[in-house]
Amino acid sequence: MRNPKPSAMLDWEGSGLPEAPSAPESLKESGLTLGFLNDLLLRTLYTRGGMLGLDLAKLTCLPFKVIEEALKFLKDEKCIEVAGGDLIGRVSYRFNLTELGRRRAQDAMKLCAYVGPAPVPLEDYIEQTYRQAVTGINCSPEMLRGAFTHLVLPDMLFNAIGPAIVSGKSVFIYGPPGNGKTSIARSIGDFMNNAGGAVYVPFAFLAENSIITVFDHALHQMDEDAPQDRMDDSEATIRRLLNTGSVDPRWVRVRRPVVVTGGELNLEMLDLRLNSDANFYQAPLHVKANGGVFLIDDFGRQLVSPKELLNRWILPLEDRHDFLTVASGKKFQVPFEQLIIFSTNLDPRDLVDDAFLRRIRHKVEVNAPTRDVYERIFLAMAKRLGMNPCPDAIDYLYERYYDAGRSPRASDCRDLLEIVQSICRYRRQPVELTRELMAESASSFIAEFD
């Protein structure tokens, strides 16, 4: 990679976009060996059949001038045969496997059956990931409020969230259930995804002679602001051939990712996942989250114990890098460069010890709403559901339940009002909020043992 080192960080007050990886001008600059590229091309032709040079370049996400050296080698070795093309040149030639080439391709498939975009070298992945770190993202109260307009938060709570985002460090959001911890965490993710700028994610990287796929259509959202080719096919082809100053197509420009996991999380999901049939790996969730947010919701109720999970992460949280292990037992280092959020209904002191809590830079407590906050949430939800304001309904809830000892929950507003809506629809009557309907809704929703 011919870009500045990771210390040359982006000015987040400026473009909001890290410097893009440059397309390689040669096989050496691609970071791949001739042998590796030969095998990738053989597997591609074996699985896809004969292909034009341009299509081979597109599928492997490498400029034709980079794969041309490997194609010439394979032709000289009598592994491929070449059919002539039109006036565009060698890029328009059709390449087919010979019988020898098919045997070589079958041997290559036994070692690794990966076919697709060529991987980037591990060192390039590390460099680019640190270049687009979450630390120091441009965030101000005015910018942040846009992601929280649907929530009613006390000023003290809102003001604790912004510095946590700017720091890029880990965040512990805790408190009793039903008061918006998950909504707050997801709103942080929305802010990072929509206002945090774009990042570059590789389709795959190469480490310890193994391919590890990273880009995931389910988790990575393509950046709609990425420049698109506005040329006809011939002009686009010429640009790809020249490839002067263009972005390396092995990288995808995406919005900052937001990866959410809950009770299903286990330690295996934090390790490389081997595709045993094809003999390549899929990156774990926290690697796919690099440059964005990794939310562990309902922390403490995972399949893995909190102690095991935190022991797995105690050093990555401190050092901002992790180690992954391939099947041979060899380890390699990857960035741990994300805003990690733990959200829990449980007392943090019952989950982790002081040594770990010290490594969680920000602790945000979300308590039961005060009455004035509760009323604001209630009225906002009533308006959202098309209901009339009814102070008597709120008075009833406090007289019957909250003043009698039940702790109010922010989520009660939504749940109770939706029951009122269902009652009215069932009775085929206009949805109008009254004290009596709220009493009926509450008797259904709030059990006596609450």
Image (cartoon, rainbow, N blue to C red):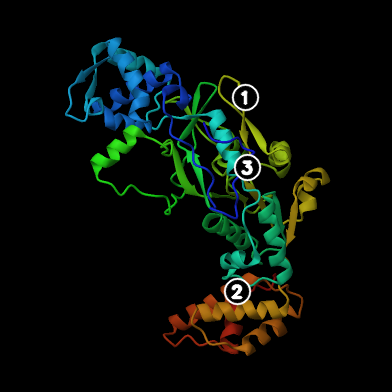
The residue mark sitting in front, 2 or 1, is: 1
- Residue 105, percent across and down? 33, 17
Q: In the picture, which quadrant includes the C terminus?
A: bottom right
Q: Residue at x 43, y 49 (%)?
A: 222
The residue mark sitting in front, 3 or 2, is: 3
| Mark-to-mark CA distance, 2 and 1 | 53 Å
Q: Which mark is residue 331?
A: 1
| Residue ID for mark 3 | 337
| Residue ID for mark 2 | 445
Give the amino acid at mark 3.
Answer: Glu
Task: Give left or right: position of 309 versus 24.
Answer: right
In this rendering, the count of numbered labels is 3
- Residue 379, percent across and down? 59, 81
Q: Secondary structure under badge 3?
A: loop
Give the amino acid at mark 1.
Answer: Lys
Q: Count neighbours of disc 3 (C-alpha within 10 A) and say few if under 14, some if 14 to 19, many if 20 or more.
A: many
Earlier residue among tags 2 and 1 = 1
- Residue 96, percent across and down? 23, 21
Asked whether residue 443 is in view, the answer is no
Q: Nearer the viewer, residue 99 or 421?
A: 99
Task: Give left or right: position of 39 versus 198.
Answer: left
Q: Nearer the viewer, residue 194 or 411?
A: 194
Give the amino acid at mark 2.
Answer: Phe
